[in-house]
Image (tube, rainbow, N blue to C red):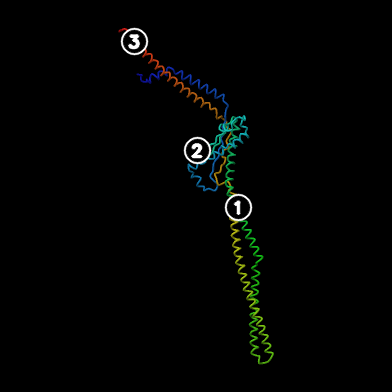
Amino acid sequence: MYPSFDAFEYIDYVRRRWRVIAIGCVAAALLAGGISLLLPKQYTATASIIIEPPGGSDARLTTAVSAMYLESLKTYELFGNSATLFERAAEKFHLRSSDSQSLESLQRRVLKVAKVRDTKVLEISATLRDPKAAQELAQYIANETVAMSHRENLASDQDFSDVAEKQTAEAKRRLDEAQTAWNALAVGEPVESLQSEIDADIDLRAKLEEQLTAAESDAAEYHEQTQDGAFAREQAGAAEARAAFLAKRSRELQEAITQKTTTLASRTARRLALETDLKVAQQNYETVGARLLDARATAGTHAEQLRVIDPGVVPQRPSSPNIPLNVIAAVFAAFILSAGWLSFAFVFGRKQDRFARSFTVVEANERERELRI
């Protein structure tokens, strides 16, 4: 049967061997500090981008931002993490030390793009040995990220502009057709001159009616005087002939007036119809034209707008190696390992003692049995 664990015995065992832990921690601290001093220094510069709501949105919506909306903004990390963009940056800043170096591993080591939790801020961090180059790289990636987002917004809004341009072209064609038809009608089927002709015919017929009335009165008067002689009969015949001519001329004018009035009504109706079509075409053209101008003016503003709010500064202190952190981590690891080794030694030593004691007891029993025999 194994004896129970004695905590006081274990503490006393560790206390008597505290130098093992102390030497291990000191050695780990010296080793970690020395290695950290030998490692090349790395500097990290960070540029910040604000993700603003789409242009033209209600200002009240900027304060009513849900957690789901903020989480959806993480998709803009893809712009900053674009492999194509980093490849251009690597060529611009000569980041690749050799052709065998993987661009993906270099990007993971040098660049970090992340949206700050529960905010609309996108941070772009660049880590290089040269602090100035790190700041320039972070600023370049930030500016290109904003430009890439703007180009994508313009491309997405280009569809609306294309549709508006087609509608404007179609409306312009209809307006030109309506204007051409109106001009042709105004030249080929004038209304004002025809109305003047009708007015002149009406005036002429009125005068003919007056003359007809006078001729009929003369004819009737000369008929009453036919018993006075041949002169009266001749005058009566002349008055009747004149009255007949005037009556015929009046009927012809009436027919002409009726025909011209019908033509005028037809022309007026067509003119009103074309005038209505022209007004509708003009109004439609102005509407779609205004829509096209609005589409062009607001192109690229229907999605979130990215803007660099902090291009970053040249870092003064290296981000790595972090000597205090490395030393603390090494000391902690050495303490854990030393304590573990002492615990193992303590348990192993107790097992050896138990084995030695049990062996001694067995020998004593054997001797006692031999003596009895």
Residue 197 in the image: state x and y as whole percent: 65, 72
Front in this rendered view, residue 147 or 152: 152
From mark 1 to mark 2, how far is it between C-alphas? 44 Å
Asked which secondary structure carries label 1, the reply is helix
Residue plotted at (60% across, 61% down):
277
Disc 2 designates what residue?
A: 117
Counting residues from the start of the chain, the first of labels 2 and 3 encountered is 2
Circle 1 residue:
166
Q: Are marks 2 and 3 in contact (CB under 8 Å)?
A: no
Q: Residue at x 35, y 12 (%)?
A: 362
Q: Position of residue 27 (x, y in %)?
A: 50, 20
Q: Nearer the viewer, residue 40 or 255?
A: 255
From the viewer's side, name the closer residue of 35 and 213: 213
Between marks 2 and 3 in the image, the one whose residue lies nearer the viewer: 3
Q: Residue furthest front?
A: 373
Q: Amino acid at mark 3?
A: Glu
Measured in 3D between alpha carbons, the distance from the residue under mark 1 to the one under mark 3, in whole angstroms, is 113 Å
Q: Mark 1 or mark 2, which has the lower sequence index?
A: 2
Kindly check if marks 1 and 2 are in contact, taking CB atoms under 8 A apart as contact.
Answer: no
